[in-house]
Amino acid sequence: MKKRTMKVLALFLSVLMIFGMLTACKTKEPKETPTTGQEANKPEEEKPTEPAEEEAPSEDEKEQAENELPREETLYFAGQQWGAVVGWNVLGDGNNNSMALAASGSGSRTIMFETLYMYNMLDASYTPLLADGPYIWNDDMTEMTVKIKSAAKWSDGTPVTADDVAYTFETNAKIENNQGLAFAPYIESVTAVDPQTVLIKAKLDDSGKPVNPLQVQQFIVQVYIGQKAWIETVETRNNNDATAIKNDVAEDVVYSGPYHKYFADDTKVVYVRDDNYWGKDASMWGKLPVPKYLAHAIYSDNAAAQVAFEAGEVDVDQQFINNVQDLWEKKGLPISTYMAEAPYGICVNMPTAWYNLDNPALQNAAIRKAIAIAVDYDKINANAMTGQSPTFEQVPRSCMNPTDGEQATFNHDAVKDLQWVGNDIDGAKKLLDDAGIKDTDGDGIRELDGKKLSFIAACPDGWSDWQASIEIVAAAGKNIGIEITTQYPDANTFQSTVTSAKQTDYDIFMMWTESASPTQPWGRVRNLMSSEFNGKDNNWSGNYGHYSNDRIQELLKKIPAETDEAKLKDYYTECVEIYLTDIPSFSLMYRPDKFHAVNESVWTGFPEAGDGLNIPPLDCTDGYGIAALYNLTLVQ
């Protein structure tokens, strides 16, 4: 176990300070990597080179993948993949392939498919990946220019070009997949000026200003770039049918990242390093990532994964662990977290209980507020989070995460009368009584319009911290005369249900909010309340309860183009006021974007606060967090 001597409280506060508005436009290159894209004399474009042919795995190799990979060559993960992989389609939304396809504004996972830039939530910087050098806005932020690295290659040996970027955007928009729905409203066009120059034009409002330059900046760190030639192949074999294109399993997919599929079944998924990966070029990492294999067993729940983690069978664990400090303080295991003391990670996310507003009873604001103020959030913090989160007394609720930058975006005094700490049973009962929502037959359950208030609350089975939270929500209901029954379906079933256009299975359910990204806190307000997602199937973008508010839609349009800080603060304050008044959902805790615990029985060199590497604690896979794969060494 590494010893750390930092003053943790001071460190935590300093980490929070580095989050400004998270809209900075800094660009940095990876460590030990020469600056690229800015040399006076660029080499002429090379012809595509044929990659060395990769042999298909032999039967012995397949048997090895099914049983045991070379431990000294394999980095094992837990907490990212739940259920068997469905597909490998960079255009699809239902791949259930979290290790390879997890697009996010806080930093997309880029082990197999790559983005133009890698976002780093630690300093809001953009590190070029497929891109060559910094992106360039024109003066009025209506057009962005991005260069493509000449070294960047697809897995078939052909160069990554501006045409690939343009065609990816066009196809996403055309087939209305998740990325198309997310960015087409804000980007007018993506065109190839020449093979290595991309021009991104923002959509403009009636006054000629960009609708949302923040979304353009998020596009370049979130959206995976696909190969135009491969996309055309998929379109042809699916007769240009959008649904069929999105559902294509894509076993033949062409990729640009350092790893690709080696083995997958319902027990595990394994990725093998592509030793021809273009990133070993001096213009990028200058070397290959250290582990040859990345592997993820498919565990039944958090408990099973934790047993494997403690045993050293898992190296990187992205899941909540009760009293994680006990693993090194009491058990003496070679386990550590990004920060040595609570909260052990950087809390930028707010797991939230969403109300299904398609349920007529939950369209009653008094019921929504009564449940929300009755929940014992301190108990969630103590029991579900075991103290690994700031409390709502320490950081009162809003639409913003606890970082200093986001907390400075709204007027705290203006909303303090709307905020609640929780466990207000008497206040909740009075609210319901005053609304005429009472128990008229003496069975302990209140009625509305003659119907008993009975709701189903759900989250994925095996997600222990979420399940503990939902149980506390159910207990709050019981305390105020509302029946709340808990259900814990498997993660695949749960997620496909709550991301559907309309569902009647769950009345209260947990989902994430957006974390640190180039668009915050605008992006989280949108995530929590924007009606643009209503009626959309396979909606992973937010507002899962289908809330609608015209004024919120107006504010979401105004904020991105506003440069007056005072007006911005007024707008964000109004957003918070609406959220805390209408309560379409209510956050249950603050938590890290990713839990990042590591077992150093086999591998060491993982990022930790204060190490000077500036690699975020994102499980060695997300955004600039993938830089960790290039720093690992075997334990001697």
Image (cartoon, helix red, strand yellow):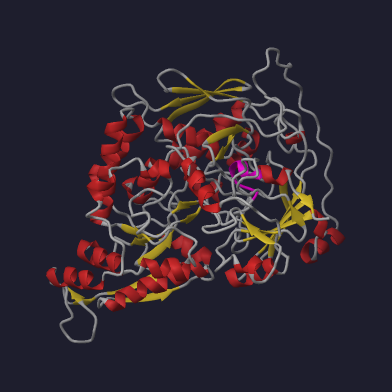
Q: Residue furthest top?
A: 40
Residue range in magenta is 620-626
**177 up-or-down from 125: above or below:** below
Q: Residue at x 64, y 35 (%)?
A: 227
Quadrant location of the N terminus? bottom right
Q: Nearer the viewer, residue 163 or 428?
A: 428
Q: Is residue 513 left or right of residue 168?
A: left
The quarter of the picture where residue 419 lies is: bottom left
Residue 179 position (above or below residue 40): below
The quadrant the C terminus occupies is bottom right
Can residue 548 be seen?
Answer: no
Query: Can residue 315 be seen in the rendering of this structure?
Result: yes
Q: Residue 598 in the image: x percent, y percent?
A: 66, 58
Residue 68 belongs to the span the image colors magenta:
no
Q: Residue at x 63, y 49 (%)?
A: 608
Q: Image check: 588 left or right of 289?
A: left
Residue 42 image offset from top left, x and y in percent: 70, 16
Residue 621 drawn in magenta: yes
* Horizontal side, residue 343 vs residue 521: left or right: right
Residue nearest the observer in this picture, 156 or 428: 428
Query: Is 601 left or right of 266, judged from the image as shown?
Result: right
Residue 578, position as x, y percentages in the image: 24, 49
The residue at 83%/44% (across/down) is 54
